[in-house]
Image (cartoon, grey):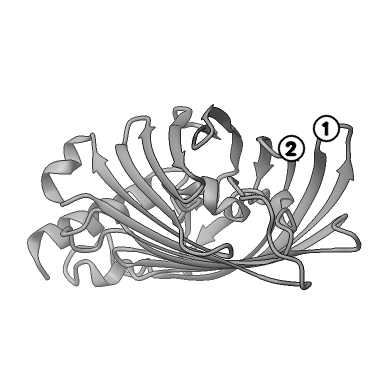
Amino acid sequence: MKMRYITFVGFLGLFSLGSVALAQQQVMYSQYMFNTLAINPAYAGSHEDLSVTALMREQWVGLDGAPSTQTISAHLPFEKKRIGVGLMAIHDQIGVSDQTDVYASYAYKIPLQHGSLALGLQGGFSYYKAMFSEVSSTDPTFQGVDIRQFLPNFGAGIYYSTRRFYAGLSIPQMIQSRLDDGNVVSKSKIIRHYFVHSGYVFDLSPSLKLKPNVLMKVVDGAPIEFDLNANLYLHDMVGLGLSWRSMDAVVLMLQVQITDRLQFGYAYDFGTTALRQTHAGSHELFLNYRFALSKSRIITPRYF
């Protein structure tokens, strides 16, 4: 193994064994505003048709063992758009740890005077695998602490939206499961994450719109994390965005509405921590396609 790989995964392993909360936690996305089902089950069915999103994230490019994430999700409305259902699969790998999540979502939408309020639930499982013994065959710290564990979980959320505004609150994983390495119970466990997110679309001119977004993540025992973002849309076809993620990165974003139903997005993260000296930034790609459930065309563009 390369020395920096051993150092990186060794750090992760030591942190896992010595802290109260590692286990691979909620996956981080720069383009969360276009992948909302991954953080809030109440978003299910919010589009007019069957909406399918694929996202790939390569974090800290050039650093061996750095995070790599692949996500695919789909959701659609039923019963005159009062009910939404969704399905999501996430694969996330960091060093010698590997996690696969599969969750189904259900949302019930309550029409209001100016918008709608959706209440959502999700249930599924995470399969967590951490081969700490592969870090070093001679260091006793990592010997006999491999973890393979199947963890069921469930989450909940609320999501209010109008044509130009949205706000949500969610807890994607509510059960704080502890990881067992097979010999001794480790101090690592899944920690509950709380997400608050919101955005609004402003008209700057007939051809230019501004959409600011904010995401706040609250985790017990850790500083509150903020993600502040603003996207400019030209003719509802091209979006340019800039984000700041507290204590982590500055992000440049591009979205292109290729057709009425196909959207492409790209994000590049510039690290702002000392770790930026060891890598060449992070890349994130997403594709969203909305399959028609009826013969009607999409009349208005979707900003979230």
Residue type of the residue flagged with mark 2: Thr
Q: Residue at x 24, y 40 (%)?
A: 271
Query: Badge 2: few (under 14), some or many (20 or more) residues near its Cα, within 10 Å?
Result: some
On the image, the x and y values in percent for residue 261 come to 58, 65
Foreground: 158 or 207? 207
Q: Relative to the observer, which residue lies in front, 22 or 81? A: 81
User: In the displayed structure, does residue 61 sit left or right of residue 105?
Assistant: left
Instruction: For residue 284, say whether it is visible.
Output: yes
Instruction: Give the camera-side residue of 273 and 213.
Output: 213
The percent coordinates of residue 279 (x first, y second) are 16, 51
Give yes or no for contact between labels 2 and 1 (Cβ–Cβ under 8 Å): yes
Find disc 1 in the rendering and name its residue: 114
What type is the residue that disc 1 sits on? His
Residue 162 disc label: 2
User: Left or right: 245 with respect to 124?
Assistant: left
- Looking at the image, which residue is at 72% across and 62% down? 123
Which x, y percent locates residue 6?
A: 16, 61
Q: Residue at x 36, y 46 (%)?
A: 253
